[in-house]
Image (tube, rainbow, N blue to C red):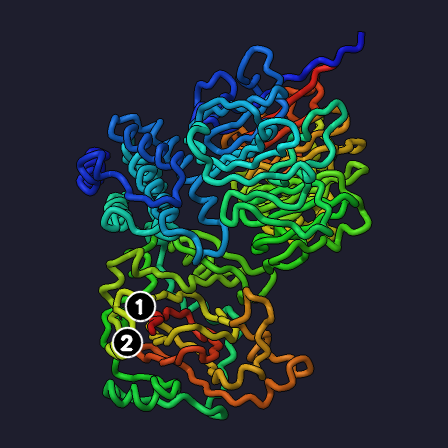
Amino acid sequence: MAEERRGSWFGFGFCGFGQALGSGRGRQVHSPEPLQTPGEDADVCRVSASWSYTAFVTRGGRLELSGSAGCAAGGCRDAWASEALLVVLRAGPGRGAGTELQAWAPGSALSGEPLWAHTVGPEAEGEDAPGGEPQAGALPLLPGARAYVSPRPPFYSPLAPELRARRLELGAEHALLLDEAGQVFSWGQGRHGQLGHGTLEAELEPRPLEALQGVPMAEVAAGGWHSVCVSETGDIYIWGWNESGQLALPSRSLAEVGKTAAGEASGPKEDGSDVRTAEGESGGLAPFIAIQPFPALLDLPPGTDAVKASCGSRHTAVVTRTGELYTWGWGKYGQLGHEDTSSLDRPRRVEYFVDKRLQDMYTSKQHGGHRPNPRW
Amino acid sequence: MAGAGTLREALRALLPPTKEELTLQLGETVERSVVRLLREAVELFCGGRGDECLQASEAILDYSWEKLNTGPWRDVHRDWRRVYAFGCLLKAVCLCEETGDAGAVAAALRVCDMGLLMGAAILGDILTKVAAVLQAHLPSGKRPAPGPAQEQPHEKKARHDHVRIPDVRSERTVPRLRCPSLQHFRKHFLVPGRPVILEGVADQWPCMKKWSLEYIQDVAGCRTVPVEVGSRYTDEEWSQTLMTVNEFISKYIRDEPRDVGYLAQHQLFDQIPELKRDISIPDYCCLGDGDEEEITINAWFGPQGTVSPLHQDPQQNFLAQVTGRKYIRLYSPQESEALYPHDTHLLHNTSQVDVENPDLEKFPKFAEAPFLSCILCPGEILFIPVKYWHYVRALDLSFSVSFWWS
């Protein structure tokens, strides 16, 4: 009998507000622990983690918040959590009534009136997944991809229709968009190189990344000040701020603590992490990189193909085709899942999931939430 | 040396006595979750749970740090800088609550300095006072034990490539005046926007006699300051970093420096009020529209050879020279076109031309642009009118103080 088992959720990182990581004890979780998801068999299809609270949406349309904000509500198709605003996509009453986008203060427990609401017309709903399940997980991009939401005014931002956005991600001060053809666009502040156009200048409107033209991308992800995308062939391109090694490039701050890969011996290690030689042509050590203003191709161990990337504010996580999880960058709150609080400037496999297969993941500030789907 | 007990008392004496007073009034910008965490941290602190307070303070610092790094600095909401300063305050006090050992005190002082550098004033400028107390409690005085025969730094000049002293006699020089009246200065220089060197105004300031390397190390040695590393800020390898004044002096002034390090454009006198007593605000600043509190006073301290590329500032500037000499070239704002400013937003106030080694093929108009120049010496003040282009190179170990006013 080929019945697909539903997967379980695991989480690690900062949980100073008891936002349902692990056992809820302690402010940090350094190694993956099963997530306390609401209900016994509640099938969580979407997790959106903010700094102080987490939002869970089940296939049945139930929304639950835990952490600094706590409540439950029904009729939700998707949720997007940020400290200032909780954005929810709720099914309108009755068929054909469309969907309503609502923004709430996280502490409001979804009672009373939302801060603002916007009806997403039925014609904009786009294709649902086979079986009639709603397309969850597209926020902050709205169904129909004509606009997106942001936690700061203007809350509702239209997108030029010719953009044909498939996916949109927001960083602290920039935005990334992936279109139907696999082209990546970026706009916003550029002072940390996060736009990838080779300068530190800001861009007011979505601008395509010329360096990536011709390489169709399958996924994009935005960290606080860095950007990642995954090609259809499983390669990772990364750019932006490297202050904690989140680009997997030699980082000065890690070197000062003795943790950079620069200067280490070359060759892959047993745990599957990739060790960079960091030796220049003359045999000298490669320079530290604080800012990478245009995309760099990242080396994972040979034979590994990435399928999904996700970023916290200052760290990066990648799931491979074979269900492995690699993380790197800022690790102070255990958000890398390596059972310690070190930051890393090179990819390292999360050992906990070695005998499991990861299917999906979401990350947030000082947080890592990951969902494996064990198969045997 | 005073033990942990007296340090603890001294710090507690500075803090507000009640939980309610150890609170920041914050507006809507700071999210409720952060306000809650701040309240929790104060509870932990008042409850004597130092380790947990330290954890909460770290979370406050890490979260607010992200806000400080989001968007242009001038757009960062003051409340986030106050939250950051508050996190620094709690962390610094918790760090030396348990032990008063030198390591803990030095670490706490560094945290205070971070709060002063990146935060905003809270609770009656408490961080400045806490820093002063910590500084006083650092063992063996404030500077490292003197080595055998402290060499005067200028003795090391013999080992450097000899410095190129420009022959300013062949260039049009900046006029000099001795103690002009306010009206004369306003009429002939401020209003028409003309540079002038003022003599007899700063030459009696205490700093002129007091400021030596030893004195600076004594008063400020253990304090953390921002340092620019690299020949000039337009270079690719240029970077900014933080270190103590002692480290700066050892690495970039005394011990045969490999790179150029410059303690530049830093409001040192807000950080260390004791130094402020050694300088004065030139009377001529009262001719401006702003209040005295709005005057920005910066320290510029570095070895021979530091360069500030040709650039312009949006305010009037009095540049007072305390130690060493600086070669300065000035171009009128009317010559801007011949100075080829960068077209990026980041560097639009900076010329692309290397003044003392111009690429005249790339920048042909520069050769004909008229300019004034001078060698500014200790005791002298140069008036740089608003938007006047200026290029500065230190001919010796140099300390200057600039006053930006409007």
> Residue A3 versus residue A335: which sits nearer the camera?
A3
Q: Which residue: 59% across, 41% down?
A: A223
Q: Is residue A76 above or below residue A156?
A: above
Q: Is residue B156 above or below residue B37?
A: below
Q: Is residue A374 above or below residue B266?
A: above
Sequence-wise, the earlier of marks 1 and 2 is: 2
B340 left or right, relative to B396: right
- Residue B220 lies, in percent from the top left, at 31, 55
Labelled pair 1, 2 in contact (Cβ < 8 Å): yes
> Residue A339 versus residue A53: which sits nearer the camera?
A53
Give the structural element (helix, strand or loop) at label 1: loop
Q: Which residue: 27% across, 77% down?
A: B202
Quadrant of image for the N terminus of chain B: top left
Q: Residues within 10 Å of mark 1 (few under 14, many from 20)?
A: some
Q: CA distance from mark 1 to mark 2?
A: 8 Å
B318 left or right, relative to B235: left
Amino acid type for the residue under numbered disc 1? Ile
Q: Residues within 10 Å of mark 2 (few under 14, many from 20)?
A: many
> Residue A38 versus residue A125: which sits nearer the camera?
A125
Q: Is residue B153 visible?
A: yes
Q: Is residue A16 visible?
A: no
- Residue B243 lies, in percent from the top left, at 43, 51
Amino acid type for the residue under numbered disc 2? Cys
| Residue identifier under label 2 | B285
A292 left or right, relative to B231: right
| Residue identifier under label 1 | B295
> Residue A127 versus residue A307: which sits nearer the camera?
A127
